[in-house]
Image (tube, rainbow, N blue to C red):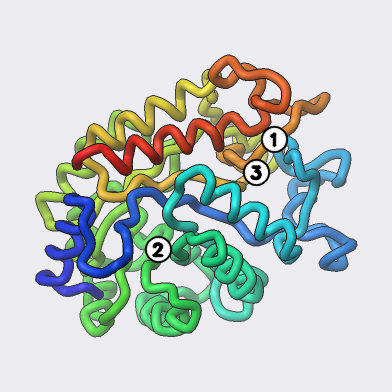
């Protein structure tokens, strides 16, 4: 963990836009999923066939990728995705990671190399893998350093008590951990360095000022999560939907994050196709939702509308004085 004096310096660096080293501060980061597979590349469909879907014609998403169904183990695909993210002005990729030995772990070297070739920094999204404990996350942090990953976003840490987190995190140095929680008190008590929200369905822009205000009062970094919308009906049957409103949802969340003086704006997501939070290019296809109409765009411009709008907002974040 970064101890108080170091944390104060890190916060100053993020707020001021300066740097204690030659590296620029991370002002924006995006959640990325390396879990997709195809029979041609991986021997079977991975994730595209959830909830009874039958790819490639019918996939477990309310949207359809411009790339079609792809493999996250295909280097050409991953390198192109990282270039898109970098061109959108995002500073860091937060890679979904389900523990050592998982499919996502096996693909981490490929994703890390591709991201760094695109001049992106890499963090890990530590998911609730079977048997995860506070002690195992500390061991994970040390393991992930071999990939030069020193920032971890811990999803759903509330299943483990704050006291147990603190007892383990006090002995960890050289890594920075964010807790996925709107409760800064829990994160501070657990010894985390910051908070993020991830869930754009539950936590919206109206919550960001309170969350970041409480985090900053406790000397924590605040990384609220913005997203274009939410629609998981085809992938999970979840009936709740957060409409995209032709791009207005995304704009309103970004605006709220900057007004809340976010230290880092996290984006949910680049390619979580199951939940319909993705900004990766999507095509207009019969039976699927699309980005047509977002910011008035049609045709190929609509397919990449959210990447283009992300570039607008990351530029604003980079030059907005926190």
Looking at the rendering, which quadrant does residue 207 occupy? top left
Depth check: give the residue in front, 278 or 20.
20
Q: Residue at x 36, y 80 (%)?
A: 138
In terms of depth relative to the viewer, which is nearer, 299 or 230?
299
- Location of residue 153 with respect to 316 vertically, above or below: below
Q: Secondary structure at mark 1?
A: strand
Disc 2 crowd rating (10 Å Cα; few below 14, some 14-19, many 20+) is: many
Q: Is residue 97 left or right of residue 25?
A: right
Image x and y of residue 176, in percent: 30, 69
Q: CA distance from mark 1 to mark 2?
A: 29 Å
Q: Nearer the viewer, mark 1 or mark 2?
A: 1
Residue receiving disc 1: 282
Q: Point out the tag, 1 or 2, that comes first from the N-terminus.
A: 2
State the residue at coordinates (71%, 27%): 300
User: Circle 2 sits on which residue?
Assistant: 154
What residue is at 12 percent from the left and 70 percent from the top? Answer: 4
Crowdedness near tag 3: few (<14), some (14–19) or many (≥20) residues, C-alpha within 10 Å: many
Which mark, by number, is residue 65? none
Tally of numbered discs: 3
The residue identified by callout 3 is 273
């Amino acid at each position: 963990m970064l101890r108080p004096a170091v944390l104060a310096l890190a916060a100053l660096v993020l707020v001021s836009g300066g740097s204690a080293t030659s590296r620029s501060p991370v002002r924006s980061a995006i959640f990325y999923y390396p879990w997709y597979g195809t029979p041609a590349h991986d021997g079977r469909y991975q994730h595209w066939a959830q909830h009874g879907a039958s790819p490639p014609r019918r996939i477990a998403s309310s949207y359809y990728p411009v790339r079609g169904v792809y493999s996250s183990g295909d280097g050409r695909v991953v390198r192109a995705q990282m270039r898109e993210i970098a061109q959108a002005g995002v500073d860091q990729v937060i890679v979904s990671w389900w523990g050592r030995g998982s499919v996502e772990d096996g693909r981490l070297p490929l994703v890390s190399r591709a991201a760094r070739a695109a001049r992106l920094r890499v963090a890990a999204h530590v998911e609730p893998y079977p048997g995860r404990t506070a002690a195992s996350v500390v061991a994970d942090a040390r393991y992930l350093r071999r990939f030069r990953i020193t920032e971890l976003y811990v999803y759903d840490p509330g299943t483990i008590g704050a006291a147990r987190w603190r007892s383990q995190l006090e002995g960890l140095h050289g890594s920075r951990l964010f807790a996925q929680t709107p409760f800064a008190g829990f994160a501070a008590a657990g010894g985390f360095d910051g908070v993020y929200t991830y869930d754009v369905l539950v936590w919206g822009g109206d919550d960001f000022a309170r969350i970041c205000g409480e985090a900053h009062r406790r000397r924590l970094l605040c990384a609220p999560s913005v997203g274009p919308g939410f629609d998981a009906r085809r992938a999970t049957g979840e009936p709740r939907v957060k409409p995209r409103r032709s791009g207005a949802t995304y704009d309103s969340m970004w605006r709220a994050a900057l007004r809340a003086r976010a230290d880092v704006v996290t984006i949910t997501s680049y390619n979580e196709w199951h939940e319909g939070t993705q900004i990766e290019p999507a095509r207009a296809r019969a039976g699927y939702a699309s980005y047509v109409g977002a910011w008035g765009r049609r045709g190929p411009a609509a397919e990449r509308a959210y990447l283009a709008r992300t570039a607008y907002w990351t530029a604003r974040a980079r030059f907005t004085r926190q």
